[in-house]
Amino acid sequence: EKFVAGILQPTMHILHLVLFAVLLLLTPGSQALRFAALSGSSDFFLPVEQGWKDNCKFLGVDCTYIIPDFSNLGNGTTSADVCEEILLQLRQEGIDGLAIGNTGCDGTRMAPIVEELENEGIPVVLFDRDFVPANRTAYVGTDNKMMGRTMARLLKQLRPEGGTFVIVGSVDDRDEGFVEEVTRDNDRDDRAQWNQIDDPTIVSDLPGGSSRYADLMDQYAEKHNPTAFIIMRQTPMRFANWTQLVDTHRHRGITYIGTDGSDYQLSYLHRKYVDGLIGQLPYEFGSVSVQTLYDVAVDKKEVGNTVATNLVAYNLIPLELPDLAVDQNLLHGLKYLGWICFGLIALTVIGCIMWTYVNRDGIVVRASQPAFLVMTALGVLIMGSTLIPLSFDDNGNPFAMSDSKRIGICMSVPWLSFTGFTITFSALFSKTWRINTLVNMSSHFVRAKVETRDVIGPFLALITCNWIVLLCWTFIDPLKYDREFLPGTDFWNREFASAGSCKSENLSSIAFLILLGFLNVLVLGIACFQAFKARNIQTEFSEATYIGLAMFTLAQAFLSGIPIVVVVREIPVAYYLVLTFLIFLLCMAIILFIFLPKVSLQKKYKKMTPRDQQNMMASKLKKSMDFNKAEQASSTNLPSREGSKHISDKPVSENRSGASQSNFSVSGYFEKKEDKKEDKELTKAKMQIEMSESSTGQDLVQSSTD
């Protein structure tokens, strides 16, 4: 037993170790991944190698970094052959991911091998240059279009006055991004202009590597004296006599913007042989390539077609920065637009008030209640005067004003706008309520007389509520004019735009604004409700139809205007224009819709004799009351003696006495007629309209006309 136990115990230990080793081998990720990179040999790729190795160590990946050896080329062997052989060997040895940089090899020869690796599930990324026409996993490197745009911004920073430029060492996407950005404002007269020089007589395809670019730049400098050379590749600055080239043309004041930030280029920058550099980050080429392969091979992540790396900008800050022109967003001549709009509103209002006064004895004006017409016009004038403080310009120096003036300018806007709005629509509400009351009571065979003082109470209540809120706002947390810098800085991190606006110290102004909005929406709603009730009353007495048209116009204006106001809030000039036109449209819509129909009716009645005027007005009032009775009967499900019959627009016949007078009245009571021989039309209508000088029946219309 001891012998058997001595044999089995070590055997079990061995089996446990074997089983553990098998499980370790079968566990995913237990074997170290192997990535390989095929890269170029220039100094540019030294940071690439460092970034590759550092991230491989951090992720625990077995990495190989290969630089092709082209020293033994000959006997029919090309650089493409060398690269192809390296790739085939890596594939045979077994790798889990491959990164290929700009080695100088022919990408088309590599494409089939890259396709085979991808088909086998082995990710392949290209870095620095996307030169292999194959279905690779991703490209890691610089977004060349963004790099071109960044070079353009650096040029604008160094030469804000604009000028001409020559592109040296063209790179497709970089060229496109640069030209788009540098010429973006060429259609604006207030911005610097940049124009490209492209001379077909200067041969750009010259032999000699970096020297050919030097010859090209020399020719352009002599012939065109450009403002700037934009060097899209590193190669031109490798020219051995670069400093001599720059010194030769230094008197021309040419600005040189280069690519990359190698040590020798930074040395040129320090000695002012180049004015600015936009550098790629080759270290990131290596580190990001490893990370991308790891994400795909291990974490099974989906990566984009392009994985962009960051850029770095180098330039010398001049001792004297360019002059800063701050855009203060002043209105300048546009402020006169607000004054003109207010002038048109004022002239229209004054004209309407004068017309009301001149025609105060006319039958249409008396029936339309001239006191309320004048109130409506004055409310529109007050509301339109909001354009005066809105058109204020501080000439860029708000602190030259006293605090009381800065508060007065801002707080006058809500005071004028809300007061004018309340007066206008309270007058319309009171006027329409009065005629509704008269017609409704007369329709019930009740004599009615409603004086102006009977309906002035609601108006005073509404205007008082508005003024109480406005006073609280003014004393608790008033709006105050101030000027602030807008978001954004120039190329030297200086704020270049400001705008004047009204702001309060606390957020309580929002609460006051909401409360005022509620009160005035209430006023508007009441006015619309009374107008709806008066929809069947003839235009001689009520403006229900035209109030509705005015509301429809205003609704359209606000539905389209308010979103625009929100969008352009940070564009001061556009914001001012939108508000100006909205206020102008609001005021003109109200005044014209209320007064133009009256003017038209007055002309119509002026052509009639006093007797015809009385008869026509009586007929209109009879028709309004009959419509009202018919609607009341239908709303209570009772048959209407009057509403179901045709209502004639013909003037009511003269009274039995045949009297004719200009001061007319209509009886506010109705009598049942028992006489079978009575006139058929009057029998159907069940209404007697008497035209006499007696006080009987004067109350209804006299109260509305006087």
Image (cartoon, helix red, strand yellow):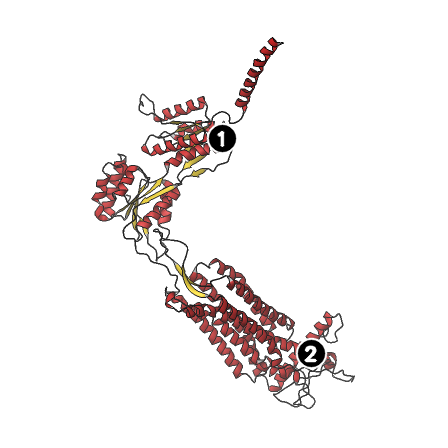
- The answer for how far apart the CA atoms under marks 2 and 1 are is 89 Å
Q: Compared with residue 390, is residue 19 higher up or lower down, i.e. above or below?
A: above
- Left or right: 2 with respect to 41? right
Q: Nearer the viewer, residue 153 or 112?
A: 153
From the viewer's perspective, is the residue at label 2 or at label 1 nearer?
A: 1
In front of the other: 270 or 630: 270
- Graded by Cα atoms within 10 Å as few (under 14), some (14 to 19) or many (20 or more), the crowding at tag 1 reads some
Q: Position of residue 295 (x, y in %)?
A: 48, 33
> 592 above or below 3?
below
> Which of 297/673 is in front?
297
Q: Disc 2 or 1, which lies upstream in sequence? A: 1
Q: Position of residue 565 (x, y in %)?
A: 49, 61
Snapshot quadrant of residue 448 = bottom right
**Which amino acid type corresponds to the residue marked 1 in the rendered image?**
Ala
Q: Secondary structure at mark 1?
A: helix
The image shows residue 481 at horizontal and vertical percentages of 43, 65
- Residue placed under numbered mark 1 in the picture: 297
In the image, what residue type sits under mark 2?
Answer: Met
Q: Which residue is mark 2?
A: 441
| Helix, strand or loop for disc 2 | helix
477 to 540, vertically: above or below: above
Is the residue under label 1 in contact with that under label 2 (CB below 8 Å)?
Answer: no
Q: Is residue 159 visible?
A: yes
The C terminus - image quarter: bottom right
